[in-house]
Structures are given as structure tokens and as C-alpha cells.
Image (spheres, helix red, strand yellow):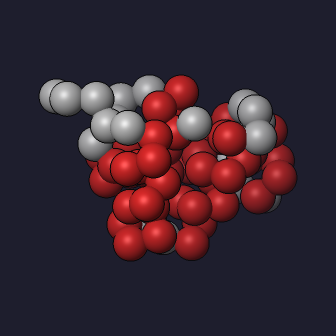
Amino acid sequence: MPRQSSNNIKNREADLLSGREQEIVQLVRKGYSNQEIARQLLISEATVKKHLSNIFEKLGISRRTQLF
């Protein structure tokens, strides 16, 4: 799969991601770990991982570093 540019990804986020997924992306960009995101949003770490999986699929990426 071709690598998506970060500008392209950021432009597509509002159209493709739910509000909660957008919150998670912002926390990832701030350097939060999955555990820290879970604590911040009062959800389980498994739920964070599921959201990240959905985010990756929607944006056509495979690593959280591609969100930067």
C-alpha cells in the first residue's frame, strides 16, 4: 500500500473520523501512550486500541507515527 502524506491524512480526518477518533488522534499527536489516552478519556486500553485500528483502516495507514 502506498504511504499517505501527513498533509493528506490531516485533510481527510474530519470527513472520515468520528469525534472520538479525532480526540484520540490529537492525544497520539501529543505523545500520549495508549494507557494515557485510556485514562484521559475514561475508557479501557482495549477500546483505545480498537479506535486506533479503525483510524488506521479509515486513513489507509499502518502505524501511529503516520499520524504526525
Q: Position of residue 14 (x, y in %)?
A: 47, 70
Q: Is residue 29 left or right of residue 36?
A: left
Residue nearest the viewer, comparing 39 with 58: 58
Q: Residue at x 78, y 58 (%)?
A: 42
Q: Position of residue 48 (x, y in %)?
A: 59, 46
Instruction: Place residue 23 in its image quadrant.
Output: bottom right
Look at the picture and state if 33 lies above or below 50: above
Q: How many marks?
A: 0
Q: Is residue 37 left or right of residue 65?
A: right
Look at the picture and state if 22 lies above or below 36: below
Look at the picture and state if 56 lies above or below 13: above
Q: Position of residue 31 (x, y in %)?
A: 75, 33
The answer to whether one can see residue 37 in this image is yes
Q: Quadrant of the C terminus?
A: top right
Q: Residue at x 38, y 50 (%)?
A: 8
Q: Position of residue 17 (x, y in %)?
A: 44, 65
The answer to whether one can see residue 50 in this image is no
Look at the picture and state if 62 lies above or below 59: above
Residue nearest the viewer, comparing 55 with 12: 12
Residue nearest the viewer, comparing 16 with 37: 16
Q: Quadrant of the N terminus?
A: top left
